[in-house]
Image (cartoon, rainbow, N blue to C red):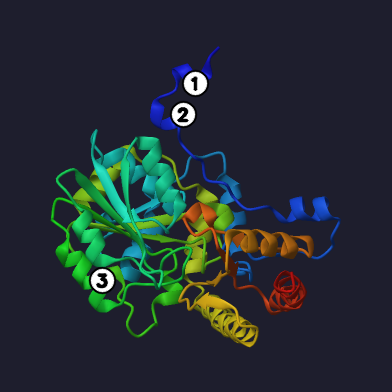
Amino acid sequence: MNIKAILPENIRDLKPYVAGKTIDEVKNQYQLNTISKLASNENRLGCSPLVKDAVLETLKQIQDYPDPLAGKLRKALAKRNGVDDSEVLLAAGSESIISILCRTFFKNDENAVTANATFVGFFVQAGVRGVRLKKVPVTESYKFDTDAILEAIDDQTKMVYIANPNNPTGTYLNRDEYRKLVDGIPENVLLIADEAYYEYAKDTDDYLPAIEHRRDNVIILRTFSKAYGLAGFRIGYAIAHPDLITEMMKTKLTFEPTAPAQAAALAALGDHDFLEKSLDLVKKGRDQLYTLFEDNGVTYEASISNSVMMILDSEKEAIDFTQGMLEKGVILRRINAFGLPECVRITIGTPAEMEHFKESFKQVYGSIRNH
């Protein structure tokens, strides 16, 4: 059978998301005992200790389908964010919600405007739907170019996607920039404000959470995969006008997220101490990286997320650096798929992981520079 002949053109040409290497893969490939996985922006502290008991409790009724509305968690999130239950939707991670958005709102021949260097998951899900992407270059400081984005909107534009803070750069739109973008987008165009790293950014002085400057056409995405440490459960949520949520519910998979995921998220949401501990770890880790990079003449971009983007002189140097670090058991993320081939993203880890990074960095970066 000719598989390509039966595929739609957009699926045939689609470039899938390629995840980073797992800890077990690296252990086996390089015969190493110590691995520091600093590639995927997970919470390296793990998750709240309250999660385990909450999840185990759900196993007593695991034969039953989960609540399709995630009622308890939905109410808790609505209360936390000062909105009505009808304005919240839960799904299996914010990437699943992006898929829902693409299934729900795009008509044929419509386009989406975004940046050339942002979350590649949006590129993939838009591609699955056959959406034409208009990718606007980021600024010289690796930020969304609000003027260029607004200029790129045309009569066929259905959606504008931004990640704020941005992934993989860690940069963000300040209050004035975000207001300008929201207020400049036509009311018949949806603005997707992906705030996967909201918890890390929320206390930054000039950062404006989307919830504080809402319009009826704004859809906010949040996740439990980052600060809450629940990436393995796959759970995220959207906040939007209830009429938009109603339409999104039509195309959401009925029984996502799972019962264990709902219980884990509800428990994590209630553990403020663990969240603050996680945020503090990241703040200290970022400062450590800044100092290390400045001491060694490394260019980097200041971040308000849980990672820092290192900027090397070329794509080859980025390849050599990540490979050298990998051979020492430090998994990093080259972000060529995000449109930045000369850059490497480093997740903030535990003190032990950051020490592993520091010692390996001195050897690998020094070796690259000496060639």
Vertical arrangement, residue 249 with respect to residue 301, above or below: above
Q: Amino acid at mark 1?
A: Lys
User: Which residue does the image show at 43% across and 63% down from the upper left?
Assistant: 196
Q: Amino acid at mark 2?
A: Arg
Q: Position of residue 29 (x, y in %)?
A: 81, 51
Q: Which mark is residue 12?
A: 2
Q: Which mark is residue 4?
A: 1
Q: Nearer the viewer, residue 141 or 262?
A: 141
User: Which residue does the image show at 52% across and 19% down from the upper left?
Assistant: 3
Decide if residue 71 is on the left or right side of residue 62: left
Q: Position of residue 15 (x, y in %)?
A: 49, 40
Q: Earlier in the sequence, mark 2 or mark 1?
A: 1
**Res 238 → quadrant:** bottom left
Vertical arrangement, residue 258 with respect to residue 273, above or below: above
The quarter of the rendered structure image containing the N terminus is top right
Alpha-carbon distance for marks 3 and 2? 36 Å
Q: Secondary structure at mark 1?
A: helix
* Residue annotated with mark 3: 178
Q: Nearer the viewer, mark 3 or mark 2?
A: 2
**Disc 1, disc 3: CB below 8 Å?**
no
Q: Position of residue 268 (x, y in %)?
A: 51, 67
Alpha-carbon distance for marks 2 and 1? 6 Å
Can residue 316 be seen by looking at this rendering? yes
Decide if residue 30 is on the left or right side of residue 235: right
The quarter of the rendered structure image containing the C terminus is bottom right
Q: Position of residue 333 (x, y in %)?
A: 60, 60
**Res 277 → quadrant:** bottom right
Q: Nearer the viewer, residue 198 or 36?
A: 36
Mark 1 crowdedness (10 Å alpha carbons): few <14, some 14-19, many ≥20: few
Can residue 241 be seen by looking at this rendering? no
